[in-house]
Amino acid sequence: MLTSIFHAGSFSAPDVGLAMATALVLGLAAAALYRTVAPADGGAYPMVLAVMPMLVTAVIMIVNGNLGVSVAVLGAFGLVRFRSAPGTAVEIGFLFYAMAIGLAAGMGFLTLAAAIAVAVGLVLLLISRTPLAQGTARERQLRVTIPEDLNYNGLFDDLFQAYTRSCRLERVKTTDMGTMFELRYRLVMRSDEKEKEFIDAIRCRNGNLTVILGLVQQEKNVL
């Protein structure tokens, strides 16, 4: 039976230390899992993910175990982050994963927090190895410049079919006073080892103009 280490809303120093330490250890495990599931994603997000359960645990204890108030406070914190930069599906999923661990630890259910970390972590790891997650880490953004006299409709279709698993045209804009078109695609490569071969094939098709292939960049929210 799962029982809380806290009694009647009172917190002793050893219990608080144990809850915070448990949240930190489980947060570090969640961050390590994130680096395994999404190795292409860098930045400081794994560090934030590691301390998120600890922060949630602190918030839960500050409001004295009132779960409704705690969720409201954490929701306000979450809005601050998502206003500045929308997260990817993987980032949002791991954020809720870390929050669930912190909620359980903050209520004193340390065994439940560990069970959530292990059970959900195993599911995430297993799913990341299935076809459901294939292509997530290899999603790329392609920007190609072509002369205005080239019809971009179907111009690279045979190359996309040969080198990519999926591809869609996201945006077309004019550049250089309307003398060029810039095409932006979202695609998933069949093989990362053939990226140079793919770029060379496009350069032969667009007259050796600019070709940029990189990781998908997050749009900045201007609000």
Image: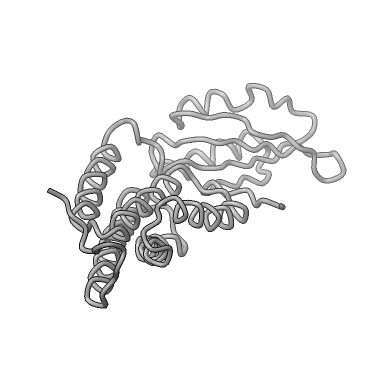
Is 131 or 49 nearer to us in this picture? 49
Q: Percent position (x, y) of residue 3?
A: 18, 54
Q: Residue at x 30, y 52 (%)?
A: 36
Residue 55 quadrant: bottom left
Q: Percent position (x, y) of residue 180?
A: 78, 39
From the viewer's perspective, is 174 left or right of 212? right
Q: Residue at x 40, y 34 (%)?
A: 190
Q: Residue at x 33, y 59 (%)?
A: 31
Q: Percent position (x, y) of residue 93?
A: 40, 45
Q: Residue at x 83, y 46 (%)?
A: 176
From the viewer's perspective, is 47 left or right of 30? right
Is 4 or 204 nearer to us in this picture? 4
From the viewer's perspective, is 28 left or right of 169? left
Q: Residue furthest front?
A: 8
**Tally of numbered tags:** 0
- Above/below status of 177 relative to 43: above
- Above/below status of 207 relative to 217: above
Q: Residue furthest right?
A: 177
The colour scheme is one colour
Q: Residue furthest bottom?
A: 13
Is 98 or 202 nearer to us in this picture? 98
Q: Percent position (x, y) of residue 170?
A: 64, 33
